[in-house]
Image: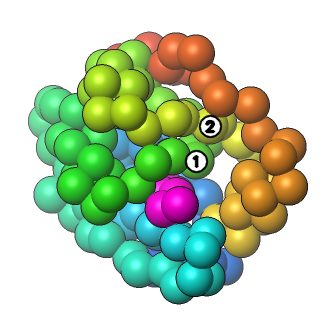
């Protein structure tokens, strides 16, 4: 299974980014192989609008089946859900800690976005 994480940098030790749509990177981790890749989200970091929707499309294009992030807005959540991507919210400080929580089954699937659109 491929799991995407909203990250501040391109390593597993990176901080989990507070905002999904404007995260600097997405770490896409393959739970079957233990291999991960970093995907740039630079086009959305300073976007005037639509960052969450575009970021959701980027995550979908990676083949991820799940997204783990601190927060996800309502529009991005709808795009991710429509693509069949399950969203999990966590307050884990790093990608590695969020990955460990995910693999241990300690994260619950989100049922909606947990912040308003255009959240700062």
Q: Position of residue 24 (x, y in %)?
A: 37, 63
Q: Which mark is residue 77?
A: none
Q: Where does the C terminus fall, quadrant-wise?
A: top left
Q: Is residue 11 magenta?
A: no
Alpha carbon distance from label 2 to label 1:
5 Å
Closer to us: 25 or 103: 103
**Could you tell me if residue 119 is visible in this image?**
no
Label at residue 68: 1
Circle 2 — which element? Answer: strand
Question: How packed is label 2: few (under 14 Cα within 10 Å), some, or many (20 or more)?
Answer: many
Q: Is residue 67 above or below residue 64?
A: above
Please state the extent of the stretch shown in magenta in the rendering.
1-8
Residue displayed at 49% across by 19% down: 113
Image quadrant where residue 81 sits? top left
The residue to which callout 2 is attached is 88
Residue 33 higher or lower than 54, as above or below: below
Is residue 73 visible to the viewer in this orientation of the structure?
Answer: yes
Q: Residues within 10 Å of mark 1 (few under 14, many from 20)?
A: many
What coloring was used for the rendering? rainbow
Which residue is rendered at x = 41% and y = 63% of the image?
Answer: 26
**Residue 38 in the image, given as x and y percentages of width and height:** 39, 76
In the shown orientation, is residue 21 left or right of residue 72?
left
Seen from the viewer's position, the closer of residues 104 and 27 is 104
User: Image height check: is 118 above or below 102?
Assistant: above
Closer to the camera, 90 or 83?
83
Describe the element under mark 1 as helix, strand or loop: strand
Circles 2 and 1 in contact, beta carbons < 8 Å: yes
Q: How many marks?
A: 2
């Amino acid at each position: 299974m491929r799991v995407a994480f909203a990250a501040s940098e391109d390593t597993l030790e990176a901080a989990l980014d507070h905002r999904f749509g404007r995260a600097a990177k997405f770490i896409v981790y393959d739970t079957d192989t233990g291999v991960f890749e970093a995907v740039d989200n630079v086009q959305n970091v300073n976007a005037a609008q639509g960052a969450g929707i575009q970021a959701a499309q980027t995550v979908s294009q990676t083949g991820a089946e799940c997204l783990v992030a601190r927060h996800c807005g309502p529009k991005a959540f709808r795009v991710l859900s429509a693509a069949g991507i399950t969203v999990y919210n966590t307050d884990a400080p790093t990608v590695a800690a969020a990955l460990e929580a995910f693999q241990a089954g300690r994260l619950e699937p989100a049922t909606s976005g947990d912040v308003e659109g255009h959240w700062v």
